[in-house]
Image (cartoon, grey):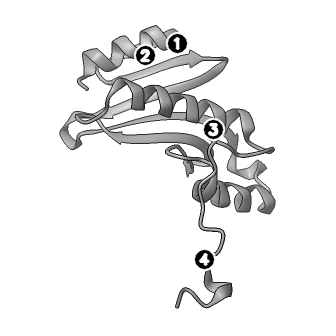
Amino acid sequence: MDLPELEAFLRRAGEDIEGEDGAWELTVDGVRLACITDERFDRMRLIAPIVGEEDLTDEHRKAVLEANFHTALDARYATSDGVLYAAFLHPLSSLVADELESGLGQVISLVDTFGTTYSGGSVVFGLPNFGPERGDLN
């Protein structure tokens, strides 16, 4: 995907879009998010702020780490500059519309389900019978 294709997708998907040249802000399903690209490093990311780190409890921190492994899917919870974000990262050149649509939906879902199910969608992925308590990892 190139930047004109990405921008066209975002304009179709959201509203109140602002920005240009690979950096946009928009609102999708009531969630304000940003799309940031770096063509030189072939990367893009969709990010949506959720809460300030000072408002995170230990339970939240544990839940987002577990969600990143089991329920967040291709999106992730991440922190930067004192803010917890939902984020979807992908190489720009190999990104296709279906992946972008899925990643966008997952980011919105992570924002919407923070504090409850911490889910990027309906799929749950994990290794229920694998772990250090079973002697499988050293």
User: Label 4 sits on what residue type?
Assistant: Phe
C-alpha gap between disc 4 and disc 2: 40 Å
Residue at 22% x, 43% y is: 41
Residue 130, numbered label: 4
Which quadrant of the figure contains the N terminus?
top left
User: Label 1 sits on what residue type?
Assistant: Gly
Q: Residue 93: x and y, percent?
A: 22, 34
Q: Which of 79 and 120 is in front in this view?
A: 120
Q: Nearer the viewer, mark 3 or mark 2?
A: 3
Residue at 33% x, 20% y is: 6
Q: Which of 119 and 26 is in front in this view?
A: 119
Residue at 18% x, 39% y is: 40
**In the depicted structure, whether residue 76 falls above or below residue 110:** below
**In the depicted structure, whether residue 136 falls above or below residue 116:** below
Q: Residue 104: x and y, percent?
A: 51, 29
For mark 4, give the secondary structure: loop
Residue marked by disc 3:
121
Who comes first in sequence, dot 3 or dot 4? 3
Quadrant of residue 18 within the rendered picture: top left
**In the depicted structure, whether residue 135 falls above or below residue 39:** below
C-alpha gap between disc 3 and disc 1: 19 Å
Who comes first in sequence, dot 3 or dot 1? 1
23 relative to 117 in the view: left or right? left
Q: Which of 107 and 85 is in front in this view?
A: 107
2 relative to 78 in the view: left or right? left
Residue marked by disc 1:
14
User: Label 3 sits on what residue type?
Assistant: Gly
Residue marked by disc 2:
10
Q: Do the residues labelled 3 and 2 touch (CB within 8 Å)?
A: no
C-alpha gap between disc 4 and disc 1: 40 Å
